[in-house]
Amino acid sequence: MKPDKKVGIYGYGAYVPRYLIENSSIAGVWGKLATPIKSKSFPSIDEDSLTIAYEAARIAIESSKAPRDRIRAVFIGSESKPYAVKPSGTVLVDALGLSNKILSADFEFACKAGTEAIQAVSGLVASGMIDMGLAIGTDTSQGRPGDELEYTAAAGGAAFILSRVSEGVIAEIEASHSYVTDTPDFWRRSEEKYPRHLYRFTGEPAYFHHITSSVTQFMEEYGYKPSDFKYAIFHQPNAKFPQRVAKILGFTREQIMPGLLSPIIGNTYSGATLVGLSNVLDEAQPDDLILLGSFGSGAGSDTFVFRVTDLIEERRARPPLKSFLKRMVTRDYSTYVRYRGKIDM
Amino acid sequence: MTEISDWRKRIERYRFQGSECVKCGARYYPSRIKCIKCGSEEMRDVELPRRGRVVSYTVIYNPPKKFSKYAPYAVALIELVDGTRVLGQLTDVDFDKIRVGMEVEATFRKLYEYGEDGHIVYGTKFRPVVS
Ligand SMILES: [Zn+2]
């Protein structure tokens, strides 16, 4: 997809909570041997997907000096909303001091809700309905204790302020593409605390089929090839999948490593590709081309291509994601269980 | 406190907004309707600087019931970069690492909630500076 008027990223910010749990300490509790990643992040007892969205959005606004009164949409993608009914954006608008003349909604599409929010804000900005909008991907996801997902379900988020390219952006969106089918690989029913998944669907029919379809259709339609890109970021539910999908599509290790954070912080769900994109923007140079391929269970995939501009240097996220990664501390399973509210009191 | 009075305080808690005496410039958080220093009742809202240093602190082990889920936690007297002194809860910190003079910054967290099915109250806490 390409809007009539070009849209890009005006500012960005990312946040990951301070706490880390090693996969080995989860495995120790449940007597497992093999684990999918090294460690994952988890939120403090006073954090949720909304406070994470706030942190990322405030960094985006302050680092880019985007005028608060010109931001007229805040769309938050998450599968771990603090309220089932009451949009997280309502609190964010007042907390960030944005104008109350604003659109706001929560988006849900498993791990691609954040990139879905980018598509929606792009359309509003391109049409001229709003000057600037915030698209956020944030999650504090949970796996049932002992379940496979408990090793990877993590917390983090990133926020992007989008505007027309003519306003001056740090990265132009050259084009995008979206692909959706009915593939029930992972779901959580209303009123249920933990999700379920079907192993048969998780890999090939879900993750690999959707990302390869979305990226391949995109490259065919717009004439890109893997070697055009300095960076590529793929959804990262574990360490293995993004590396394998990169290989299938013809991307190298060098292209994906800067945006691959799951081995250390885990799968931040709606935050995953967007936290990866933030880490790439923290180091990218003018004219670098970035490909992003998200994945959301259910299932679907969004592909975007961003071209970095000269403005990147003056609007990089402060603090950068690395500062949050550097402050992380490792905690054991008992602290994790308490902070994640897995004990009924 | 009720859910309604908490809601009325949301802007000052969310944005770390205090009050400033128009006559003598003294600043307060939470905000006051009358200046304790000069007695003036002419006060205006002011967004306070987000950085400061710990002046003193204590760890709370037996908090009021609404905070019990979060205990133990540290509360500190913080001197902001403009000299204003505020009382605030510390977060993302290990108690044995807290020091007088430690640099902290405002952050946005859950303060408490009205049970599993009630309002969640958000507001300002302080964490060690991330730069
Ligand atoms: Zn006074």
Image (cartoon, helix red, strand yellow):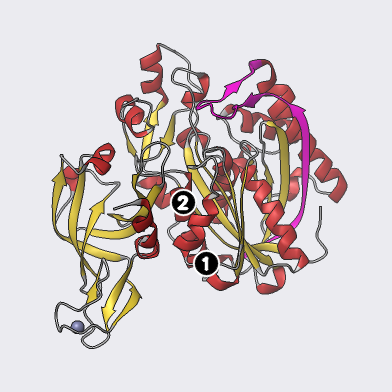
Q: SS of the residue at dot 1?
A: loop
| Residue A23 in the figure: left or right of residue B24 | right
Q: SS of the residue at dot 2?
A: helix
For disc 2, the neighbor class at 10 Å (few under 14, some 14 to 19, many from 20) is many
Q: Between B55 and B43, which is closer to the camera in this rendering?
A: B43
First of labels 2, 1 by sequence position: 1
Q: Chain for mark 1?
A: A
Badge 2 amino acid: Leu
Residue identifier under label 2? A321
Q: Between A173 and A160, which is closer to the camera in this rendering?
A: A160
Residue A59: give x, y in percent of width and height. 47, 60
Residue A307 in view in this figure: yes
Badge 1 amino acid: Leu
Quarter of the image with the C terminus of chain B in it: bottom left
- Badge 2 and badge 1 in a common chain: yes
Q: Residue at x 77, y 43 (%)?
A: A178
